Image (cartoon, rainbow, N blue to C red):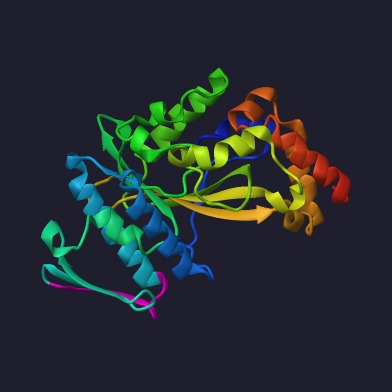
């Protein structure tokens, strides 16, 4: 479930994905467990440095991404964070996390680490920087610790089309071509949001292929005793931003997890999810790895959750 457009191919059949909408002013998620989430993200990165990649030519785009993220944090949470400029120098303060750093843009020595990881250790979203060259997008940099069945270390340097291949059906391929053209035509500062979804066992946000031995065998064995508690709806809130200085595309991925038993508390949600799972085409179901988990979840919802009126 990598790309921002990966499930657009299912849109016409199921309504489960859609073209993005212009975003609301608030873009970065800050939940009640924010300090714990960013601490977990740092622990994963420290343990597995391959969760961060940056091509040498992506240095300017990396600084551009960091500045955008720090500026957004300061604008969205002015009581907790500030970014001040004095000539060539910037002063960053994140009071909630106890971080204070002065730096000069472009001077790597003025930061304790790479610009992308410096910013990423302070937000809940994963970040990918897509560089625009020769009218194509490529994965140039990023820090992704909450991936869903992919690995940024493996995908580094891939083109937009390579990142999403293979996809089921010719129409899906054309959707991705149109999506790339759409992103390349965004104006600097433009920001859009879309949603992606899937199902998973347990509530671990990190489903990277780097840790497949930790979660893959159980998923494929369908080792589930209590589906309502163990099977989770995984929603990815994705933002796509055309960075103002370099024109690279910043791709933010925020993960939300909800067990089926809580989905079932809202009859309309339960009925919608069940309907989508029961009507997915075999090709899309296989693409989303729902061949086994989908019927299990749909069956539980059918037995436990009353159907909402249409």
Q: Which region shows up in magenta?
A: 76-86
Could you say where residue 119 lies in the image, as x and y percent from the top left? Answer: 31, 60
Residue in the picture at 46% in, 30% down: 164
Residue in the picture at 40% in, 53% down: 44
Q: Is residue 121 left or right of residue 36?
A: left
Q: Is residue 249 visible?
A: no
Q: What residue occupies the far bottom of the structure in this picture? A: 79
Q: Magenta span has 154? A: no
Q: Nearer the viewer, residue 212 or 53?
A: 212
Q: Is residue 81 placed above or below 171 in the rendered structure?
A: below
Q: Is residue 59 left or right of residue 227?
A: left
Which corner quadrant of the image does residue 172 belong to? top right
Could you say where residue 242 lies in the image, as x and y percent from the top left? Answer: 34, 48
Q: Is residue 66 left or right of residue 88?
A: right
Which corner quadrant of the image does residue 118 belong to? bottom left
Q: Is residue 9 placed above or below 82 in the rendered structure?
A: above
Q: Magenta span has 82? A: yes
Could you say where residue 290 lies in the image, as x and y percent from the top left? Answer: 66, 33
Q: Is residue 8 visible?
A: yes
Which corner quadrant of the image does residue 295 belong to? top right
Q: Nearer the viewer, residue 233 or 135?
A: 233
């Amino acid at each position: 479930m990598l790309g921002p457009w990966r499930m657009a191919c299912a849109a016409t059949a199921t309504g489960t994905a859609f073209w993005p909408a212009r975003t609301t002013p608030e873009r970065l998620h800050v939940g009640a467990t924010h300090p714990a989430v960013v601490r977990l993200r740092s622990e994963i990165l420290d343990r597995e440095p391959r969760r961060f990649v940056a091509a040498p030519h992506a240095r300017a785009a990396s600084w551009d991404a960091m500045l955008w993220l720090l500026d957004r944090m300061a604008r969205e949470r002015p009581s907790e964070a500030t970014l001040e400029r004095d000539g060539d120098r910037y002063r960053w303060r994140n009071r909630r996390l106890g971080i204070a750093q002065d730096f000069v843009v472009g001077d790597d020595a003025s930061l304790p680490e790479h610009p992308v990881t410096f910013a990423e250790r302070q937000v809940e979203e994963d970040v990918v920087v897509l560089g625009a060259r020769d009218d194509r997008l490529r994965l140039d940099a990023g820090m992704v610790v909450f991936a869903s069945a992919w690995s940024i270390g493996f995908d580094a340097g891939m083109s937009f089309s390579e990142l999403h291949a293979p996809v089921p059906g010719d129409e899906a391929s054309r959707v991705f071509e149109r999506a790339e053209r759409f992103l390349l035509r965004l104006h600097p500062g433009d920001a859009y949001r879309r949603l992606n979804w899937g199902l998973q066992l347990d509530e671990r946000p990190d489903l990277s292929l780097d840790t497949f031995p930790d979660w893959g065998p159980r998923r494929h064995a369908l080792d589930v005793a209590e589906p309502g508690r163990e099977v989770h709806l995984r929603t990815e809130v994705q933002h796509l931003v055309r960075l103002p200085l370099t024109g690279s595309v910043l791709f933010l991925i925020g993960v939300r997890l909800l067990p089926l038993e809580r989905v079932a508390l809202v009859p309309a949600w339960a009925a919608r999810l069940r309907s989508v799972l029961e009507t997915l085409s075999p090709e899309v179901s296989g693409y989303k790895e729902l061949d086994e988990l989908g019927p299990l979840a749909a069956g539980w919802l059918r037995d436990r959750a009353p159907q909402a009126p249409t």
